[in-house]
Amino acid sequence: MLRKLTTENVIAFTKLSLIISLSWPLPATATKQQVVRFRVLRFLTYVNIWSLIVPLLMTLQDWNNRPDICVKSIPLIAGSSQAFIEMWLCHGQHKHLQLLIGEMESYCKHATGYEKNILQQYVDKYAIFYAATAMWLYLTAFAVICSPPFLSDPFPTYAKYPFNVNYQPLKTIIYVHQSSVGIQISSILCITLLIALLLWFASARFDMLCNELRKISNVYELTQCIRKHQQVLRYANDVTHTVRFLILTIVGGSAAAVLFVGLVLVSQQPLILKVQFCTLIFTCLSQVFMCCWPANNLLIASSNVALAAYESLWYSRNVYMQKNLLPILLRCQKPVAVTVTCIIPILSLNYFGSYISTAFSYFTTLRVMFEENGANKV
């Protein structure tokens, strides 16, 4: 029988999935030597990814001669660029992520039995899905790495180099380099696990607060709930502020990748290549969903605090206690939401639905354009 997953297991799994891209921040207790080593490795990771993006960009020089190769390379360029930007943003938010993760780990470590039960409910509901998605990201990378023998290609990508690569050991070195970048990209794409973990944790704390509000019986308990509400609001707002540009990159990069993958699907390409790129579409959409789902839940959980206050026995308490409920009700009028001004109004499942609709409308437009172009040639 499988051992039951715990909150500590989930945190450890998320950390492990991000370790290759160095996207999990160092603990606040890290020594100076550890910080220096981390920064050096981070710089080498940038160089490693960028040294593949440049050769991929060079393939676009052959657009007139080899448009098929260029079309295949564009989704890879979009994915690599997205991973590079996500890693840069993640490292830029290193201090904020360090504080948020540190507070989460401390809270889970010192949680009471009741609080652990709430956290465990979240783990039981959502952990398997996110773990499976992380494994899918890595399996997709391994599928691309192992595809050359089946596609009669020398390398996993169509990168163009300004020198001869058809001799050993350079050929093996390039193959290993492209494979390592693929694994690193899979790791940085797992940043959605960290984003979701922080958002789910914030939602769980709102649920705990709601349960406590329903049971208040005196002014002291109400005061404690008000104080906790302020703390949870502060944490949730810090989370949304820290991850919003990471989410923007995921949404934008996934949209670009889906659009460019559409070019491959509507063009004349081998079936195995189309299947491979279909998995990329699934991966891109799952990335966006992994962010929208917890963001939607946080939106609901933060609003439910007002409902929990109303469901308490406030009507049987004195006027002073009833007045002290007003600050909670007022703060809940504006739920905690992930937003990016003028770009993402409110990240939610409704937004995800409109996102898919827009993506497939663009895909349909591409298909019609290719069909009309083919008809004109005939």
Image: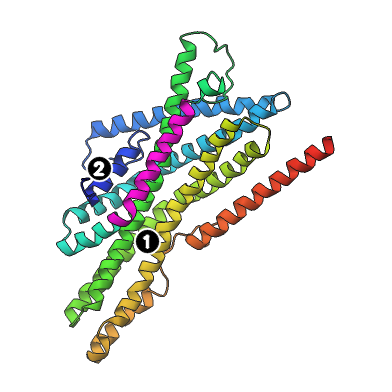
Residue to which mark 1 is pinned? 237
Depicted 123 relative to depicted 178: above or below: below
- Residue in view at x 56 percent, y 55 percent: 355
Q: Please report the residue visible at 73 percent of the width from the left and 46 percent of the height from the top.
A: 368
For mark 2, what is the residue? 27
How many numbered tags mark residues here? 2
Quadrant in the picture for the C terminus: top right
The stretch drawn in magenta includes residue 4: no
* SS at mark 1 in the image: helix
Q: Between disc 2 and disc 1, whose residue precedes? A: 2
Q: Callout 2: helix, strand or loop?
A: loop
Tag 2: amino acid: Pro
Name the residue type under label 1. Answer: Asn
In percent of width and height, residue 57 lies at 60, 28
Whether residue 319 sits left or right of residue 196 in the image: it is left
**What's the magenta region?**
124-146
Residue at position x 61%, y 54% in the image: 358
Residue 249, position in %: x, y? 50, 47
Q: CA distance from mark 2 to mark 1?
A: 22 Å
